[in-house]
Image: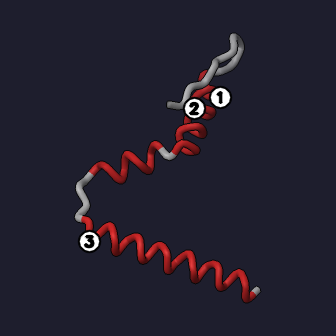
Amino acid sequence: MPGVKVKEAEPFELALKKFKKQCEKAGILSEVRKREHYEKPSIKKKKKAIAARKRAMKKQRKMMD
């Protein structure tokens, strides 16, 4: 669980920004979105395969340059 220690003179906006960054690093928002709706295992498998293809294509393009 991300947590931020706020200093005496630190503005709220800065503390909020730090907290959001920690949440993003921990992957909390992506996890929440993933669990928001039920996804059938077959759809999960398809999405995973598509993501793997995208990564492979991106890696291949990098190798070409």
Residue at 49% in and 80% down: 53
Q: Position of residue 32 (x, y in %)?
A: 37, 45
* 3 or 1: mark nearer the eye: 3
Pointer 3 residue: 42
- Considering depth in this image, is 14 or 31 the residue closer to the camera? 31
Q: Secondary structure at mark 3?
A: helix
- Considering depth in this image, is 15 or 33 the residue closer to the camera? 33
Q: Furthest residue to the top?
A: 8
Q: How is the image coloured?
A: secondary structure
For marks 2 and 3 on the same chain, the one whose residue lies earlier in the sequence: 2
* 2 or 3: mark nearer the eye: 3
Dividing the picture into quadrants, the one containing residue 16 is top right
- Considering depth in this image, is 16 or 3 the residue closer to the camera? 3
For marks 3 and 1 on the same chain, the one whose residue lies earlier in the sequence: 1
Residue at 46% in and 42% down: 28
User: How many numbered discs, if any?
Assistant: 3
Residue at 57% in and 80% down: 56
Residue 19 is marked as 2
Q: Position of residue 36 (x, y in %)?
A: 29, 49
Q: How far apart are the alpha carbons under marks 3 and 1?
A: 42 Å
Mark 2: give few (<14), some (14-19) or many (20+) Cα within 10 Å.
some
Q: Amino acid at mark 2?
A: Phe
The vertical placement of 38 against 5, above or below, is below
Residue at 60% in and 24% down: 4
Is there CB contact under 8 Å for labels 2 and 3? no
Q: How far apart are the alpha carbons under marks 2 and 1?
A: 9 Å
* 2 or 1: mark nearer the eye: 2
Residue 43 is marked as none
Pointer 1 residue: 14
Q: Amino acid at mark 3?
A: Ser
Q: Secondary structure at mark 1?
A: helix
Q: Position of residue 62 (x, y in %)?
A: 71, 81
